[in-house]
Image: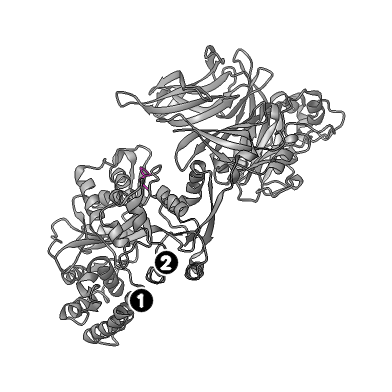
Amino acid sequence: MDRFKVVIFSIGMLAALLCGCGEIPEETVDVQSGEEENAGTPAEAHTEKENRTFEPLPEGYVLSARFEPVGEGAVMGEACLSGNLLYYEASSYDSEGEYVSGIYAREWGEEARLLLSLGNQHGISWPLTAGEDGSLYFVYGKEEVDGLFQVEMLEKWNRELQKVYSVDLYGGWDGDEAIYSMEAGSDGMLYGLTGRGTVLCWDETGACSKLFNLPVTLAGVNGQSGEPCFGLVNAGNMGVYAYWGGKDEVSDNSIQLYSLEEWRKMDEESRERAEPLRLDYGSAEVYVAAGPYDALSVFSGYEDGLYLADQNRLWQIGLTDGSLEPIVAWQDIYLKAEYVKAVRRQENGSFLLYVLDTLENENYWVSLDPVPASELGEKRELVLGVAGSYWYNTSLASNIEGVLLAYHRTHPECHITFKEYSQNAVMNFQMELLKGEGPDILLERQTFFDMEELAGKGAVVDLAPYLAETEGVSAEDMLPGILELATKDGMIPRIPLSFAAYVMIVPEDMEVNGMKPEEMVSAMAQGDYVDYLVRPCSLLLQILSGAEMDHYIDVENKSCSFDSEEFVNLLEKLSLLKDMERLSGREERAELFHAGQLPVIVEELDCMVDYLCVREAFSGSGKIAGFPNSSGETRYPAVLCDWMGINSASDYKEDAWDFIEFCIGYTSRSDDVRDRFAVTKDKFDCQSRYESNEYLSIWTNDYDTWKGGDDIAPTAQEDTERLREIAEHLYLYENQSLMQVIEEEADAFFAGDISAREAAERIQNRAALILGE
């Protein structure tokens, strides 16, 4: 992948922020022991140490970000950064198909070098760390028995990749606590912190000794998302610090810092009275996202001190008073805080970051370099409007903010702002579009808009010409039938990015092909129970919109035949289901299906995990089938999601299409078995194949099924063909006004207010009016 550059924040702001970074104020404050006569307080220690100063940005310069991939083709685990040298553990398959691990070293701009091959016999344990001199320390296990390592080894390698020592991790110490975090101090010592707050030390020969216990533990940290806010960090000559984030008497999300150097000098009585250095959120010029549920992280800055990361920014920590000074906003460099794993200040005031984009599952170097502001052009500003709340299955749209970050990295000339509309505000969104206002790009997480109205009044752009002329994603790249389902009156007003499908689970010996809808309904009525999803009116709408509507409607001639005997018969068959006992719990369905008391189950397949659950629960007794129509064909009612379109009033239609094309072709998560099915051929083909995965487990109340990855068989050819058959026989009829008419009159029949014949005639008359409009 080529390097690429994106621009970040304003000239004046950045110059002001970076001028003071790395400098320690002259005033001294005793924040550890609370006693002035206690020698070696942090303030005194820091003013005595010589601190490296960094060049501020020259006048008229700003920082820009360059991204370069790290560790392609490997699953990277633990990593640490020493200067511009990255050490990391990675796992991959060797030529014989064995899953093996190794430790690698890679400098910025250079190829990776294998430092140590661990094969499949050893496993990297927690943690991995590097010294400022480039030395590497890591822990690994030996003599594995029943999944547990009997011996843990600590090794040190120098920057020349020569082994310095290899020792028993706990040699000489009889504690039973696992090491949680390690840092190499500038004094040549290696420090370790256990989850119980015990601080250990290894000298230059690797000999281990216990130093003291801190008054904080891993168990007490806040339960925010992401990594626990607990561990060791390196502030260069200012020492190694332990940090802890949690609720205390000062804040619901306090960050406490403990200087190991100072605590080592204290006796037990002094430690009992000592207070940690607490970060002062109130000192910040802008808001610090430090609420009780906000994730916070502390990073080593070495000679530049320490950094704090909240969800919005990277901050410089003042080690004398806990003050905070903003360095950079994550959105300005197209990152999320959770992506960042290491930060290093460079001699010229620039930064080097190591990040893991969890959406792309890609590791990057990110270099923030000074460039003249005059070299940067104006950005074209667009707005992406997202309708509807987050849905339960993972898809590109559920990670849309991460997708925007990825897009901005490769399209620095364009900036897209994310604007979310709740489900209750979708009508306002539609009215904005009809008035020639609103966002440039629209995205529906589910189907909310009245697309007939939007398309009919020219509020949205026809995407068919873009698909025909594009050099990227074209109509040929889409699954058969997807664009046909999206076409309205000869135009494509929007394109779905993902889909789900309703299926029926029927006995192995039931022949569905050749059946008619009323025959399938009769089969449902033969059991003692009916699926709780199968209600007469909802099943009618599902049969019509998902398999059968073209049998009753002639779109070209704008006519319909709901008053036929066939439709009356379908209504009467459906009425047989209304008094049947429905299952109160979905977990009973598989048991009663196997017992022959529940003939048909209706299920929604959103992703590969859904398919695997059905396969594992019904293998040998049931099979997946589509909904039959009156022509004897089987179809699968489609649920099209993550629709994207372009506002006709947008001044940047080409940019809007470029983003839609980027989203359609976004392949980074196509192999996730929990992602909703994608609409492009390549991605769906990838999703429809499953290899054994020891880390996957499936469990669902629907079928009372739990299986680990080793128990789930890979997909066979028949599985892949069945999924393709579903994708190739999707059906969807969308006309909200017509479906509402059918629902109203059918409900009246099922309630006993009118006859089936009268309901059919009412539907016929009202439908004819709607179709004729």
SS category of the residue bearing label 1 = helix
Q: Is residue 359 left or right of residue 130?
A: left
Residue displayed at 67% across by 44% down: 10
SS category of the residue bearing label 2 = loop
Out of 619 and 485, give the one closest to the viewer: 485
Q: Which residue is mark 1?
A: 737
- The region drawn magenta spans 670-674
Label 2 crowd (10 A; few <14 / some 14-19 / many >=20)? some
Prevailing secondary structure class for the magenta stretch in the rendered image: loop
Q: CA distance from mark 2 to mark 1?
A: 13 Å
Q: Position of residue 346 (x, y in %)?
A: 64, 27
Q: Which residue is mark 2?
A: 448
Q: Position of residue 292 (x, y in %)?
A: 64, 51
Q: Is residue 725 magenta?
A: no
Q: Locate the N terminus and report the quarter of the image it occupies.
A: top left
In terms of image quadrants, where is residue 45? top right
Q: Amino acid at mark 2?
A: Phe
